[in-house]
Amino acid sequence: MSRRIKEGPPLSRERVLRAAVELADAGGIASLTIRSLAERLDVKPMSVYHHVANKEEILDGIVDQVFAEIELPRPGGDWRAEMRRRADSARRALRRHSWAIGLMESRATPGAASLHHHDTVLACLRTAGFSVEQTAHAYALLDSYIYGFAVQEAGLPFEGADTAGTVAEAIMEHFPEGAYPHLVEMAAQHITKPGYDFGNEFGFGLELILDGLASALH
C-alpha cells in the first residue's frame, strides 16, 4: 500500500529551497537528498523535480539564500564601518549555516543574491577609492579571514562565553607537571577568565585588516 501524501501548501521553488536549508542546518549537506527533501515537504520525489532539476541546482539555490541573509554594505558611506558590518553579518550567517562555509565560493552558477552581494561589496570598495587591483586584494583578504574564522569557530569543542575555560581546564588536567608552560599561561591568564569568548577574537583581527587596508588606500 503506497504512502498517502497529505495536502499542504502549494509546492514552489522557494518552499523547496527553504526546506533544503532546514535539512542542511539540521544534518549537514550529506543529509540533503531529493528523497529526504520530499519527505520533509511530505510530497513525492517527482514533485520536487518540477521545481529543481537536480541536487546541484538545490545547492546553488540554498547558497544564494545564505548570501541573501548577509547585510549589504552601502557604497558611499564609511567604507570601514560598512566592511565591518558586512563581515559581522557574514560571520553570523555562517554560524547559522555552518554547512555553507565550504560552498559559498564554490558554485559555478551563482544566483542573483550571490551576484548582487559580490557586486555591492566591490562597489563599496571602489567608491571608497580603492583601485581595481586594490579592491581585488581587499576582497580576497577580507573573505579569507571571514571564512577562515568561521571554519575555526565551527570546529571548536565549545561555543559562547565561559565555555572555552572549562574545556581548557579539562585538557590541562592531563598535562605532565611543568609541561607546555605557555599553554598553561594562556589558559590561566586569559582563556579561563570570566566572560572569555573566543568569538570576540573576530573583531580584533578584523580591525587589524581594516587598518592595513586603510594604510594601503592612502
Image: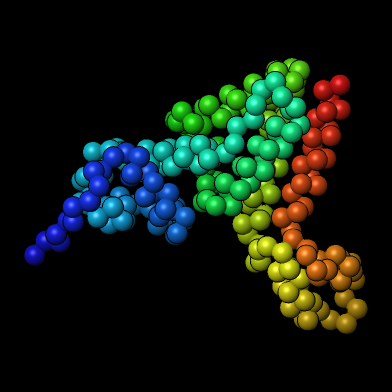
Residue 151 to residue 110: above or below: below
What is the total number of numbered labels drawn onto the structure image? 0
Quick one: which residue is furthest to the left in this view? 1
- Describe residue 153's horizontal placement relative to residue 39 as left or right: right
Tell me what residue is drawn at x 62 percent, y 42 percent. Answer: 89
Tell me what residue is drawn at x 43 percent, y 49 percent. Answer: 21
Q: Is residue 41 visible?
A: yes
Q: Quadrant of residue 184?
A: bottom right
- Describe residue 208's horizontal placement relative to residue 90 as left or right: right
- Describe residue 138's horizontal placement relative to residue 14 as left or right: right
Tell me what residue is drawn at x 89 percent, y 67 percent. Answer: 189
Q: Quadrant of residue 59?
A: top left
Where in the figure is residue 149, as x and y percent of width and height? Answer: 68, 49
Where in the figure is residue 31, as x and y percent of width and height? Answer: 40, 57
Q: Nearer the viewer, residue 73 or 110?
A: 73
Q: Quadrant of the N terminus?
A: bottom left
Where in the figure is residue 209, as x and y percent of width and height? Answer: 79, 37
Tell me what residue is drawn at x 74 percent, y 33 percent. Answer: 81
